[in-house]
Amino acid sequence: MSLSTTIGWFPVGTRLSLSLFDSWNSTAIEVIGDVVRDATAPSWILGVLVIEPPLEWSALVASAARNSISGKDKPTKRLRVLVVGDDHRQRGAMALYVTSGWDVLFASDEDSVSEAVSSITLDAVVAELDEGDERLPPIMENVRHVQPAARRIVRGAGRGDSDLVHRFVARDAGLEALLDAMTADIPVT
């Protein structure tokens, strides 16, 4: 089971609509829940009490339990990734990020990117933009300045040689290429 997150503050009592992807059954379900625990540093884990879960919820919980018991190798660290792009690009890439198992936050403009990089330690920032997009340089410059250790990746058209971007990944390359870009031995610049 994977859950993607968004940049935003949700105080206790806030009602949320959550979309969950069950990778075991390759299905997505929507649940409604109330925030019962604030997200706080350093984990930023939000507690949500699901209200009247649908029948698929039981299958999703059972699948998560099977996966946690199966003894599968788990990564030593769960990556925290900020995905930047227009809403339509984010929707198009949602399945990729939801199935990744990473903590994923989404931002669509420079202000929300600035807010995220100044308040949350990130492993990577993935811009769902093409190389020539005029929004790319100021966003990546801000990330480089505030969080120099975060990987700066562009997932879109282009193969550039900008010092603002660690790696360019083709949009259709898939999760393995994106993971490789995030974990490759790249010196901090």
Image: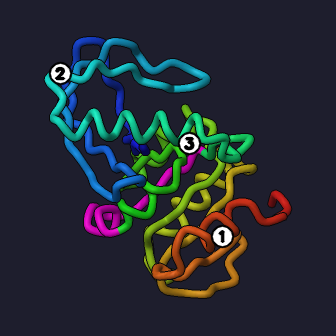
Q: Which residues are magenta?
A: 80-92
Q: Which residue is mark 1?
A: 165
Earlier residue among tags 3 and 2: 2
Indicate whether residue 53 is drawn in magenta.
no
Earlier residue among tags 1 and 3: 3
Q: Residue 154: where, in percent of width, then height? A: 55, 71
Q: Residues within 10 Å of mark 1 (few under 14, many from 20)?
A: many
Q: Secondary structure at mark 2?
A: strand
Three-letter code for the amino acid on which mark 3 is drawn = Val
Q: Residues within 10 Å of mark 2 (few under 14, many from 20)?
A: few
Query: The N terminus appears in which quarter of the rendering?
Result: top left
Q: Residues within 10 Å of mark 3 (few under 14, many from 20)?
A: some
Q: Residue 44: where, in percent of width, then height? A: 51, 26
Please determine whether, in this image, residue 159 is positioned above or below residue 86: below
Q: Quadrant of residue 74?
A: top right
Mark 3 against mark 2, which lies toward the viewer?
Answer: 2
Earlier residue among tags 2 and 1: 2
Q: Which mark is residue 67?
A: none
Q: Nearer the viewer, residue 149 or 139?
A: 149
Q: Secondary structure at mark 3?
A: helix
Label 3 to label 2: alpha-carbon separation: 32 Å
